[in-house]
Structure formats: C-alpha cells, structure tokens
Image (tube, rainbow, N blue to C red):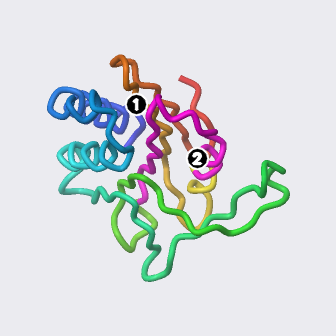
Amino acid sequence: MNFEEVEQKVRAALSRLREEDKLLIQANTNERTISHKLAEHLKKEFSPMLEVDCEYNRHGVEIKRLNVPIGGHGWDNTEAKMVVPDIVVHQRKNDNNNLLVIEVKKSSNARNRQFDEDKLTAFAKEPYRYSFGLLLEVSMNTTDDSLTWYENGHVKNE
C-alpha cells in the first residue's frame, strides 16, 4: 500500500472520529481513550487485509524493544527500551506487513515529543521495518489536527 492510500485511510478515520466521537474530544478524555476510538475507525479502513491494534507490545511472543537515544545524546548512544506504540496497522507475527505505527498526543499535553519522534524513527529499522509512522497531535480546541508523517524512519516532506 502506498503513502497516498495510507494517508487517505487515516484522514477518513480521523474524520469519523471527529464526527462520531466528538464528545470524547470535547471532554478532553485520556489519550488512550482517543487512541482506542481512532483505532476502531482505522480498522474499518484497513480490514480485512491488516490488523489494527492499540498498545501492541509483542514481536512474535517477545516483548517489543527499540534502541532509542539515551537522554537526548543522539543515535550514537542508544539503549534498548520496552515500547508500547499507541496504534499499529500490521499483520500479527509477520514483519513483512508492518505498515503503520502511530503515536497519538493531545494538543493539551505539553510533554516533550522527542521520545515519540525517536520511536517512530526506530520502528522503521530492523526488526520491525514499519513503512510509515505518524505523530498525530489531536487538537482539543479546533479540528486542525497536526499530522507529522514518517516514511522509512524519516520525516516525510510533502
């Protein structure tokens, strides 16, 4: 599946989230609640070809781990950390079909996004090889969500 198809499906799911679940956004509910509902809408877009899972922390039977930079020191100094991506679109137990990994943030969450950016970069590498990543900032005040796309581990310039 190419980027344009993935982007269209994600935007359709976001549109349904805003239409059908707007009360969750208006109430400023937890990011996990919003992620879960978004995943339900994504499933309608990607099924039956692929699975959509929230907080999927397995690689086969092993726990997912990523080598990420230690304390902002860059990619020359990394350590393996257990990770739980917010949403993945994939085929379970088959790294050849790891399509999309999404990290969801609310615009009201002021925490640094660097760790999420590092995870999206690392998920494109072995052993996971996700084709696309998305750092999604869901706006709590407007409908202007911020989507930062990654392709092969790098921010995609559109």
Q: Amino acid at mark 1?
A: Val
The residues colored magenta run: 98-119
Of helix, strand and loop, which one carries label 1?
A: strand
Query: Which sits in the foreground, 158 or 38?
Result: 38
User: Is 103 situated left or right of 121 in this image?
Assistant: left
Q: Amino acid at mark 2?
A: Asp
On residue 158, which mark appears?
Answer: none
Which residue does the image show at 44% across and 64% down from the upper left?
Answer: 96
Of helix, strand and loop, which one carries label 2?
A: helix
Q: Position of residue 110 (x, y in %)?
A: 57, 33
Q: How many numbered marks have been drawn onto this rendered protein structure?
A: 2
* Residue closest to the far front: 27
The residue where tag 1 is placed is: 138
Query: Which sits in the foreground, 98 or 137?
Result: 137
On residue 116, which mark appears?
Answer: 2
Vertical relation: 104 (above or below) 127: above
Query: Which sits in the foreground, 15 or 153?
Result: 15
Would you identify the image quadrant in which residue 65 lies?
bottom right
Vertical relation: 58 (above or below) 2: below
* Residue closest to the far left: 20
Which residue does the image show at 55% across and 41% down from the upper left?
Answer: 151
- Tell me how far mark 2 sits from mark 1, CA to CA: 15 Å
Quadrant holding the N terminus:
top left
Q: Position of residue 17 (x, y in %)?
A: 23, 34
